Image (cartoon, rainbow, N blue to C red):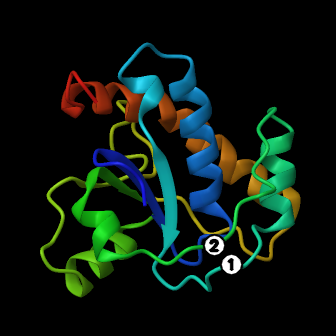
Amino acid sequence: MPDPGHIVVVCTANICRSPMAEGLLLHALAGHSEPFKSLQVVSAGLYARPGEFVSENSVIALRKVGIDISQHRARTLTQAMLDRALAIFCMTESHRALIELQYAPVPQHIYLFREFLTSPASLEIADPFGGPIKLYEACRDEMVEAVPSVINFLKTIAPAGS
């Protein structure tokens, strides 16, 4: 289980979007100073089948930007993950609503991954599952666009000694 103060990224099955977001956030945080470079990022799915392999197109889409997520295996979101999270980032409003309905206590820091973009943009990241590689690349690019705003937000809530 991750240390307290970890970041949780949530999607439906934890085989497409959230593993890509996890990989992108870890990569971006590694370039920052402490405590941010040591923040743990985990991904999980609301309806994941534990141990399922990440989708091949997700692996390909991230490999094209130099990030390897091929070893990722799906995990189901748990109350313990939520309880210990510094922040939870969902792909869609329905993911956030399901967490708020199915888990108690409801996490205080639950957001959409694209929620902190300053320019007008779609807040949700659609599921590319079963689509062509171009759909996965578009999904990745929507996440890449949001990563700086997510990190800037994390800088406002992360404890100095994480």
Q: Which residue is mark 1?
A: 51
Q: Is residue 119 visible?
A: no
Query: Element at badge 2?
Result: loop
Pinpoint residue 141: horizontal percent, then vertical percent: 66, 41
Mark 1: amino acid: Gly
Q: Which circle's residue, 1 or 2, is located before the other in the chain?
A: 1
Residue drawn at 21 percent across, 85 percent down? 101
3 to 58, vertically: above or below:
above
Label annotation for residue 74: 2
Instruction: Please tell me which residue is depicted at 39% across the width and 38% down the height of the picture.
Output: 120
Q: Is residue 106 left or right of residue 149?
A: left
Asked which quadrant contains residue 36, the reply is top left
> On residue 31, which mark appears?
none
Give whichever of 107, 40 is nearer the camera.
40
Q: CA distance from mark 1 to mark 2?
A: 5 Å
75 w.r.t. 107: above or below: below
Q: Position of residue 133 (x, y in %)?
A: 86, 58
* Residue drawn at point x = 50 percent, y = 68 percent: 44
- Compare residues 23 and 114 and report the one nearer the observer: 23
Residue 105 lies, in percent from the top left, at 12, 74
The C terminus - image quarter? top left
> Badge 1, how many Cα within 10 Å: few under 14, some, many 20+?
few
Q: Is residue 108 above or below residue 158?
A: below
Residue 117 shown left or right of residue 144 in the figure: left
Report the residue at 31% width, 81% height from top: 98
Front residue (pair 100, 54): 54
In the image shown, does 46 or 33 lie closer to the viewer?
Answer: 33
Location of residue 115 with respect to 116 vertically, above or below: below
Residue type pointed to by label 2: Ala
Do the numbered discs 1 and 2 sit on residues whose CB atoms are within 8 Å?
yes
